[in-house]
Amino acid sequence: MKKLIFFICIITIVVHTTWIKVDASENKYKILKSEINVLSIPNVLRYDFLITNNTPSKGLKHPEFRGHYYPQPSMEIAVIPGKKLSSVMSRFPRSSTFKLNPVGGSSNGDLRTQKKVLFSVEYEIKKNTDLKKVREYATDSTVIIFDGLKEVAEFPLNK
């Protein structure tokens, strides 16, 4: 119930929403849809990506583990900003290169074993920034899919 209320609140405070078709490179991963939202109340830029895996693994073997969940390296995504987007976003504090400062993210499955997985990532906008500029610059970026530490796919959003 709390998740439903939170979701409804997020939808009501969205400044602007757009669906973008992204052409993927010739690999096993593809972004079917992406949605970009600028949220004024928490001062956040949110990306949602529906990503497909053309060749999901069938039945991954996990070693015997005494805990409940096998701690395998996760599949994750990151949005790498261009110059324009970097100018309106907060910087990740412990990095020698400019990385967006993440404030949240989630996925609804495991991209290794499932055909379609929804990923969401949220990044902090600089204080006192014009949100219209953030929306305008949001596609000045590239999405990278990671399998653990390995980069497995890259998709520019400005196409």
Image (tube, helix red, strand yellow):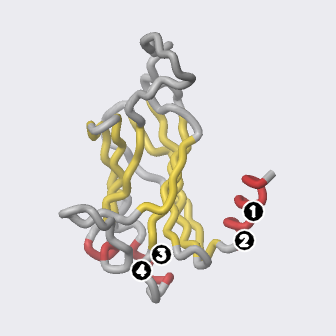
The residue labelled by disc 2 is 12
Residue for badge 4: 126
Look at 31% across and 41% down and name the residue there: 153
Q: Secondary structure at mark 4?
A: loop
Indicate which label's residue lies in the foreground, 3 or 2. 2
Report the front residue among 150 and 65.
65
Query: Quick check: can you spot residue 145?
Result: yes
In terms of image quadrants, where is residue 151? top left
Measure the alpha-carbon separation of dots 4 and 3.
13 Å
- Of tags 3 and 1, which is closer to the observer? 1
Badge 1: residue crowd in 10 Å (few <14, some 14–19, many ≥20): few
**What residue sits right under mark 1 in the picture?**
8
Could you tell which of marks 4 and 2 lies nearer the N-terminus?
Answer: 2
The tag earlier along the polypeptide, 3 or 2, is 2
Q: Relative to the observer, which residue lies in front, 122 or 144?
A: 122
Three-letter amino acid code at the position of disc 4: Lys
Separation of residues labelled 2 and 1 (CA atoms) = 6 Å
The image quadrant of residue 139 is bottom left
Q: Which residue is mark 3?
A: 135
**In the rendered image, which quarter contains the C terminus?**
bottom left
Give yes or no for contact between labels 1 and 4 (Cβ–Cβ under 8 Å). Answer: no
For image coordinates 54% across by 72% down, the residue present is: 38
Mark found first going from the N terminus, 3 or 1: 1
For residue 43, side relative to residue 98 (left or right): right
Q: Within 10 angstroms of label 4, few (less than 14), some, or many (20 or more) residues?
A: some
Q: Are marks 2 and 1 in contact (CB under 8 Å)?
A: yes
Q: Position of residue 105 (x, y in %)?
A: 51, 53
Left or right for 88, reference 120: left
